[in-house]
Image: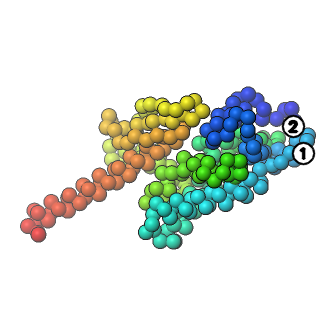
Amino acid sequence: MKPDHPWGRSGNRDLFAELAARLGYSADFRGQLDVAFNHKSFANEALESIDHNERLEFLGDAVVDLVVAEHLMRNHPRMPEGQLSRHRAAIVSTKSLAAAAEELRLGEMLRLGRGEQRSGGRRKSSLLADVFEAVVGAVYLDLGMQKAENLLLDVFGERLRAATIVAEDADYKTALQEWTQSQLQSTPVYRVIGETGPDHQKVFHVEVSVQGRRLAQAKGRSKKLAERSAAHKALLNEQKVKTVSTTEGHVGDREERGSP
């Protein structure tokens, strides 16, 4: 390994240890997880022969597809095949997987060659999506399908349960801010209201409010995940309120006109 490569600094190693513990690895077993972070450019520049993550990425891609498809079918027994396919495509898109990798801070642990490092490889959506799939593949090989499934449900659970298709570039926090600004001339405020679990498996509980009115609460493995989930719930809640208000308005109109 070239000595001037950033991988190996204590910060990255600490982050790697936290991720391994969160995924279910023991302190003395890392299996294929270490290989999942070896980009091909890094392997090509290494002083010794090392494996890169493309084979794990290949496997992880299949696992992601299977788990997402299975849970969409379970959660939406009446959803037609075409809509299921579009829903799955939105969740497994490069941009969606890259966002999941960012939530888990995988880019900070990615081992890159010097060229990829200089060109900002840690922020490239394609590389982030690839390392996410490689991590899923490693977890599947090392710990089994259930652990891989748990990881995917942690990341995509809300979207798998949602009745509507979420576009790959959807940003719940931005959507909520646009809604509150247009309807209430105010912006949402996010507040951590609690933390549970050990340091390596901490769960953050977040509340989102506007003008002192609580819109929703949610939890997540990171503050960002919890905030995004809270924004999504707030949007769903406001849609329900809007639907009820509209229905009540129609009833009132009929009563004023004397309609049955």
How many numbered circles are shown? 2
Tag 2 or tag 1, which sits nearer the N-term?
2
Judging depth in this view, the residue of 79 and 214 nearest the camera is: 79
Residue 32: x percent and y percent? 75, 46
Residue drawn at the location 43% of the way across and 48% of the way down: 232
Judging depth in this view, the residue of 19 and 146 nearest the camera is: 146
- Residue 63 quadrant: bottom right
CB-based contact (under 8 Å), mark 1 and mark 2? no
Label 2 sits on residue: 1
For residue 88, say whether it is visible: no
Q: Mark 1 Cα within 10 Å, few/some/many (few <14, many 20+)?
A: few
Q: Secondary structure at mark 1?
A: loop
Residue 115: x percent and y percent? 82, 44
Residue drawn at the location 43% of the way across and 60% of the way down: 163
Q: Mark 2 Cα within 10 Å, few/some/many (few <14, many 20+)?
A: some
Label 1 sits on residue: 49
Residue drawn at the location 10% of the way across and 62% of the way down: 256
Check disc 2 and give the amino acid type: Met
Q: Residue furthest top?
A: 10
Relative side of 22 to 183, left or right: right
Image colouring: rainbow
Q: Is residue 149 above or below residue 198?
A: below
Q: Residue furthest left?
A: 258
Residue 196: x percent and y percent? 49, 32
Relative side of 210 to 58, left or right: left
Q: Secondary structure at mark 2?
A: loop
For residue 112, say whether it is visible: yes
